[in-house]
Image (cartoon, grey):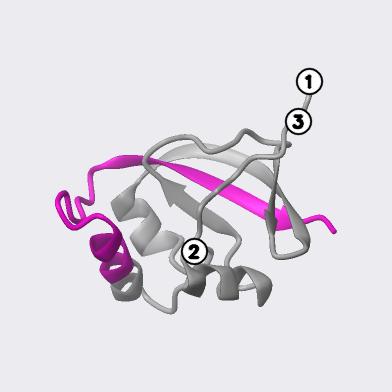
Amino acid sequence: MTHQLVFIPMRPNNVKSILAGKKTATSRTKIFGRPGDYFMIKDSYYQITRLNKKTLGEIAMNHFKDEGFNSTEEFIAEWEQIHPYKGFDASWEVYYHEFEKKY
């Protein structure tokens, strides 16, 4: 299987969290890469290690720290800012990309 270099757009606050080692996952409405694929942040490569479907409610309650946030409320506020029309719907299934720094 060939792994690809993919592009995952990140907001500046998320870039800071990734570089600080605080953010190790990102939730998206579509798939941005598969396990084994890489993406770059600044001069570092990160590899997607897992890809799962999860509900926003599960992520907000159980994975907000992996998303780089200090609380469920921070995660929800960020999601609502990014998705102003749909907002936060706890039952909405999204793609949960987990990743780690490779080099």
Mark 3 Cα within 10 Å, few/some/many (few <14, many 20+)?
A: few
What residue type is disc 2 on? Answer: Glu
What residue type is disc 3 on? Answer: His
Which one is earlier in the sequence, the residue at label 2 or at label 3?
3
Instruction: Tell me if label 3 and label 1 are in contact, CB under 8 Å.
Output: yes
Residue 20: where, in percent of width, then height?
Answer: 66, 77
Residue 75: where, in percent of width, then height?
Answer: 35, 68
Residue for point 71% across, 39% down: 5
Magenta stretch?
76-103
Which label belongs to residue 71?
none
Which one is earlier in the sequence, the residue at label 2 or at label 1?
1
- Tag 1 residue: 1
Q: Nearer the viewer, residue 64 or 85?
A: 85
Mark 1 Cα within 10 Å, few/some/many (few <14, many 20+)?
A: few
User: Whole-Å distance between the Cαs marked 3 and 1?
Assistant: 6 Å
Tell me the element at label 2.
Answer: loop
Q: Nearer the viewer, mark 2 or mark 1?
A: 1
- Tag 3 residue: 3
Confirm whether the magenta stretch covers residue 90.
yes
Tell me the element at label 3.
Answer: loop
Quarter containing the C terminus: bottom right
Which residue is farthest top? Answer: 1
User: Whole-Å distance between the Cαs marked 2 and 3?
Assistant: 24 Å
Tell me the element at label 1.
Answer: loop
Residue for point 66% across, 44% down: 48
- Tag 2 residue: 67
